[in-house]
Amino acid sequence: HYLWGGGYVMDAALKGYLAYTNCTSATSEVVPFGGKTPTMGTNPHSWAFPTQDAIGFPIVIDWATSTVAMGRVQVMKREGKQLPPGAAVDAEGNPTTDPNKAVALLPFGAHKGYGLGLIDELYAGFIGGSLPEIRGTSRGGEGEKRGSTFYFQVIHPDAMKGNDYVKGRSQIQNVKVIIEDVLGHGNEKCLLPGQPEARNGELSKKYGGLLFTKAEIEELNHLAHEVGEAAWNLSEFKSVQV
């Protein structure tokens, strides 16, 4: 897995490009719609658009095709919170909201999320990727691949630019008008995808470093213990209220 796909497309958008990426996950964690055995990955999709000249930051749409990502399950476990209904199943294949019992995930939107996850597997199939059911395991015949497959696409805005925009608008002005209309008409409090990340980026700049919750530091210390590294001393961190 290549971690957060949104970071790759965000970087491209900040350089002025539209970008898309998907990847097949390293392990089979998702049960296909109507099935009972996890034979697909969480298979995320990530898009980014260079909208910073219109709204101050790039729009970044990034999601796993499961109802939640397995990373979110780990976060919920650390924070002692329950999963939303319809997100995961236990070892017997029964629905569960307990992150400690979750062993496999369900696709979001039922057949819709299943279809979007299958897109990643098909891209991988055309590229030459591995069978999803044997990734990260010892199963599979001799010579079978077991790795993830990554797909990247970058488009310059000029490549899709129309000859004329209504009312003489420029391309980015046209984009801004569309965004303003989506967020108008009583929708002014809605956030745009990528807006929370942009805000967090500003907070990191303001406070001069990355921001972690106490639970995240404790989990990092747990990992440090597993690999024999020194733990962080929580009292040495600067505390901020955001």
Image (cartoon, rainbow, N blue to C red):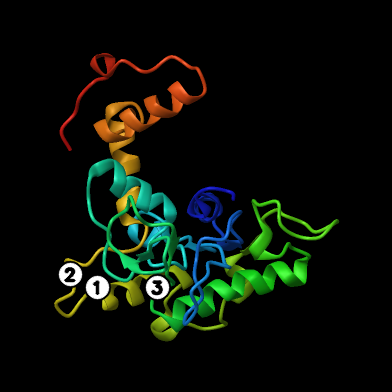
Tell me: residue 205, above or below residue 128: above
Asked if marks 3 and 2 touch (Cβ < 8 Å), the reply is no
- Residue 31 shown left or right of residue 137 in the figure: left
Q: Position of residue 182 (x, y in %)?
A: 28, 77
Asked if marks 2 and 1 touch (Cβ < 8 Å), the reply is yes
Task: Check disc 1 and report the residue beneath it.
Answer: 183
Tell me: residue 10, above or below residue 162: above
* Label 2: few (<14), some (14–19) or many (≥20) C-alpha neighbours in 10 Å: few
For this orientation, the residue located farthest to the front is 92
Which three-letter amino acid code belongs to the residue tagged 1? Leu
Q: Earlier in the sequence, mark 2 or mark 1?
A: 1
Which three-letter amino acid code belongs to the residue tagged 2? Glu
Instruction: Check residue 160 in the rendering and tell me which mark sits there, or answer none.
Output: none
Question: What is the spatial separation of the Cα atoms under label 1 and label 3, in whole angstroms?
Answer: 25 Å
| Helix, strand or loop for disc 2 | loop
Task: Check disc 2 and report the residue beneath it.
Answer: 188
Q: Position of residue 209 (x, y in %)?
A: 35, 28
Task: Check disc 3 and report the residue beneath it.
Answer: 108
Which three-letter amino acid code belongs to the residue tagged 3? Phe
Tell me: residue 155, above or below residue 203: below
